[in-house]
Image (cartoon, helix red, strand yellow):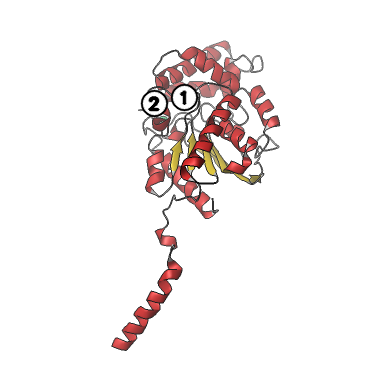
Amino acid sequence: MKKTLWSWLLAAAMLLPTLSTPAWAVGYTQTRYPIVLVHGLLGFDNIGPVGYWYGIPSALRDGGAQVYVAQVSAANSTEVRGEQLLTQVQQILAITGASKVNLIGHSHGGPTSRYVASVRPDLVASVTTVGGVNKGSKVADAITGALPPGSVGSTVFNSIVGAVGTIIDFLSGGSGLPQNGSAAIQAQTTATMASFNAAHPEGVPATYCGEGAYQARGVSYFSWSGATPYTNIFDALDPALALTSLAFSGEKNDGLVASCSTHLGHVIRDDYAMNHLDEVNQTIGLVNIFETNPVTLFRQHANRLQGMGL
Ligand code: CA
């Protein structure tokens, strides 16, 4: 009996070194490369880039991921924001010693991340856009007067403009915003994004509502989005999103971006019962209680990247 036990222990001891990185010891969200979260239009002032991703960085870190929250201009062209992000990615690589990063961008942070992957694909393992304005936003079109004449009535138009103002004021603390808002909105029109996509086509679907290449120039591309503008009666911003959703004339959207416009690379899903702010667990965790929690989606995605060796 004793002898059997000893031989079992010996065998176990010999096996141990081969299990030096057992699968069960790797955290659920522990990716090979650091994750960099890239905010959209509203990532500044009292919300700030960290609070913008409400509860998301900590949830990813708890599962073992290295997470960095980028801070780029709240309102500027995709290219200017992209250059700022590139500098930060290079700093993160220098700090961590990693060779690449996984970029996850929300809203205008999507195209911003795509810019970096397009100009420096060697530094990027993956780009994921969440509610990404990849083919522009009809809300931006409406505000800049680029929607086809007669597509929305003037009353609806005024409601949309007012609602966008409400959202921007609320999330930014209300200081010096109109100029910021309009500058950012110009960058996100359908026309501006069409030129951007011509210059940076990686992962962009060839058809309006299709999927794009899952991998381009060594970078993996993913996207997801919501498609329910009004989700929680306690969220003060939901009525505003219900109004901005009128710009889409019935097309599936999250309040600010059409589902089809968010498509990039591998489309994980484009119809979560979430609005544009729920996608980043805003406002302060007030999301649709009948839908998967947005934080869970980020954790699942980190696990997906881990499974792909990214
Ligand atoms: Ca919400």
Q: Residue at x 59, y 22 (%)?
A: 187
The secondary element bearing badge 1 is classed as loop
Proximity of marks 2 and 1: CB atoms separated by less than 8 Å: yes
- Total labels: the figure holds 2
- Disc 2 crowd rating (10 Å Cα; few below 14, some 14-19, many 20+) is some
* Picture quarter with ligand 1: top left
Residue 84: x and y in percent read: 54, 28
Q: Residue at x 56, y 33 (%)?
A: 86
Residue carrying label 2:
47
Q: Position of residue 42 (x, y in %)?
A: 46, 24
Q: Quadrant of the N terminus?
A: bottom left
Amino acid identity at mark 2: Ile
Q: Disc 1 designates what residue?
A: 42
What is the secondary structure assignment of the residue under circle 2?
Answer: loop
Residue 226 visible here = no
Q: Which image quadrant is residue 120 in?
A: top right
Badge 1 local density, few (<14 within 10 Å), some, or many (20+)?
many
C-alpha distance separating marks 2 and 1: 8 Å
The amino acid beneath tag 1 is Leu
Q: Nearer the viewer, residue 121 or 250?
A: 121
Q: Tell me if residue 153 comes above or below residue 120 in the rendering.
A: above
Which residue is at a point 43% across and 65% down the rendered structure image? 20
Question: Where residue 204 appears, x then y in whole percent?
Answer: 66, 37
State which quadrant residue 167 falls in: top left
- From the viewer's side, name the closer residue of 162 and 83: 83
Q: Earlier in the sequence, mark 2 or mark 1?
A: 1
| Ligand 1 is within 8 Å of the C-beta of the residue at disc 1 | no
